[in-house]
Image (cartoon, rainbow, N blue to C red):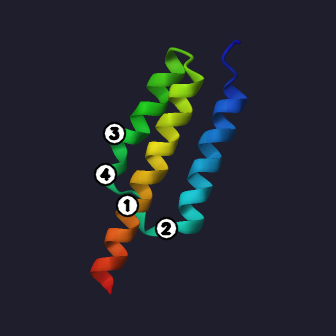
Amino acid sequence: MAWDNEWAAKRAGEAMVYLAANYPECAGAPELHSHQEAAPEAAIVEDRDGYLEALRWYMRAGRTVALQVRKRAA
C-alpha cells in the first residue's frame, strides 16, 4: 500500500491532541524529541507499523514526563 500523507498527518494529530488533553505538562519536554524524530523516519521509508509504534512511544513518553511533573508538584 502506498504511503498516505493525510493518514499520517491524522494519526500524528490524534497523538498530539491526546497528549494535550490528558497530559499538558509534557508540552515542549526535551524527553519527547527523540520520539518526535522516530515517526518521520518511519514515514520516509513508508513503514506504517513503525510510524504507529513511534507515535505510541511518543504518547507513552509524554505520559511518563507528565506523571513525573505531577509527582514532583504533589
Q: Nearer the viewer, mark 2 or mark 1?
A: 1
Mark 3, secondary structure of its residue: helix
State the separation of the CA atoms marked 3 and 4: 7 Å
Tag on residue 16?
none
Quadrant showing the N terminus: top right
State the separation of the CA atoms marked 2 and 1: 12 Å
Mark 4, secondary structure of its residue: helix
State the separation of the CA atoms marked 1 and 4: 10 Å
Type of amino acid under label 1? Thr
The residue at which mark 2 appears reads as: 24
The residue at which mark 3 appears reads as: 34
Q: Position of residue 54 (x, y in %)?
A: 47, 36
Q: Is residue 3 above or below residue 73?
A: above
Mark 2, secondary structure of its residue: helix
Tag on residue 31?
4
Q: Is residue 74 above or below residue 20?
A: below
Q: In the image, is 12 to the left or to the right of 4?
A: left
Q: Hey, which quadrant is residue 8 in on the image?
A: top right
Mark 1, secondary structure of its residue: helix
State the separation of the CA atoms marked 4 and 2: 14 Å
Q: In the image, is 34 to the left or to the right of 48?
A: left
Type of amino acid under label 3? Ser
Q: Position of residue 24 (x, y in %)?
A: 49, 67
State the separation of the CA atoms marked 3 and 2: 18 Å
